[in-house]
Image (spheres, rainbow, N blue to C red):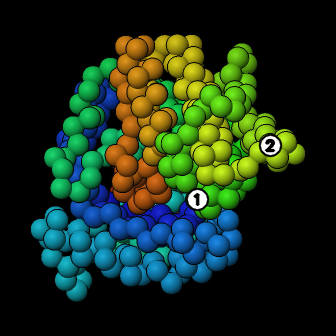
Amino acid sequence: MTILGIETSCDETAVAVLKVNPPLYEASEGHLGQIEVLSNIVSSQVKLHAEFGGVVPNLAAREHVKNISHVFETALKKASKTGNWKLETGNFPIDLIAVTHGPGLGPALLVGIAFAKTIAMTHNKPLIGVDHMRGHVYSNWLKPIGEIPNSKFQIPNKFPAMNLIVSGGHTELVLMSDYEKFELVGETMDDAVGEAFDKVARLLDLGYPGGPAISKIAENGDPNRFPLPRPMLHSKDFNFSFSGLKTAVLYLLRDLKEKGVEINDQTKADIASSFQESAVDVLVQKTIHSAREYGVSTIMLSGGVSANTLLRNKLKIATEKEGLVFFCPPLVYTGDNAVMIALAGYFAHKKTGAVDPDAPVGTSWQTIEMQPNLGF
């Protein structure tokens, strides 16, 4: 099966082609056929939105409209070379089209959905709308183009699994009992951790996006110089809160200025390091506690903030100390991309069992609807 993935939920215009070789996954067998990435094209708008300090929805949508046709054509050409198939008039070698229909920015989502509907209608192909966050979860089992097709699905007894999903808009702990079965067990009560990184970076005049900026400057910082709180670390649930940590940084900067302390590069590095340590400690400990509570076999990490080196390393070490399997995506798949959407489309397709363009349950181009607030 060859799947076309389309992603426009925020500020990346992405199109990818994914091939799933038989045998198809069967729960009783506990394995899946090979997963091969034929193309992965992403057009980022980060520089465009940096001057605004964050993503502007209508501007993002405008850029998607401008870029999506070129990204689509480039993805198909790349896939034809990687997969050794020909692009000819009347020949559209795609079996299924998957598009992000939520969650995300409404204006941005609409561009991808409209484009996907047009392609599906033109070529009479089945179209399925998928959950962007599930795509992030599935990114754990992908490999970059050119590497040996994925074999991680062959690992036995990986379920149940606890997923820590961290991004600019989400911080969630999701229990996964099978490839298609999810249960939300914890979430942020206010700011997502990625949002907190952005806001603290803004307080420190580090620019946007804040995650990479904080991570980079923190490498030269002393996390012990300015101790910061670890919100909800000892709460009895698995929820998070990062607004208080952000506010603690705000008050720290105010107090330092009142005392006449120079906010130089070293001071910024020390504050960034302390903030990052606090946020990561909360994420890691909450994840480990939830894994113990639910008796999981695997811990998984995904979402844009999963690119953070400290988080990846600390969670990996903590997971292995528990004797559990640890998955995290290759860095190329930590951000928004369409490969993960194509794979999510594969599992959504399997769940509905739909292969016909006129099939129900959202697999027809006539029935796909935008769901900006979609959740687990």
Q: What residue type is labelled 2?
A: Leu
x and y percentages locating residue 325 in the rendered image: 35, 23
- Residue at image mark 2: 256
Q: Which residue corresponds to the image point at 26% horizontal and 27% vertical from the top-left?
A: 155
x and y percentages locating residue 98 in the rendered image: 42, 60
Ranked by sequence position, the earlier of labels 2 and 1 is: 1
The correct choice, above or below, for 356 with respect to 374 in the image is below
Q: Nearer the viewer, mark 2 or mark 1?
A: 2
Query: For the view shown, which residue lies furthest in the left direction?
Result: 84
x and y percentages locating residue 100 in the rendered image: 51, 60
Q: Which amino acid does label 1 sit on?
A: Pro
The correct choice, above or below, for 117 with respect to 211 in the image is below
x and y percentages locating residue 121 in the rendered image: 43, 76
> Can residue 263 be spotted in the picture?
yes
In-image side of 306 versus 265 (left or right):
left
Q: Which residue corresponds to the image point at 77% horizontal and 45% vertical from the top-left?
A: 261
- Residue at image mark 1: 209
Q: Looking at the rendering, in which quadrant would you find the C terminus?
A: top right
Q: Which residue corresponds to the image point at 58% horizontal and 63% vertical from the top-left?
A: 10
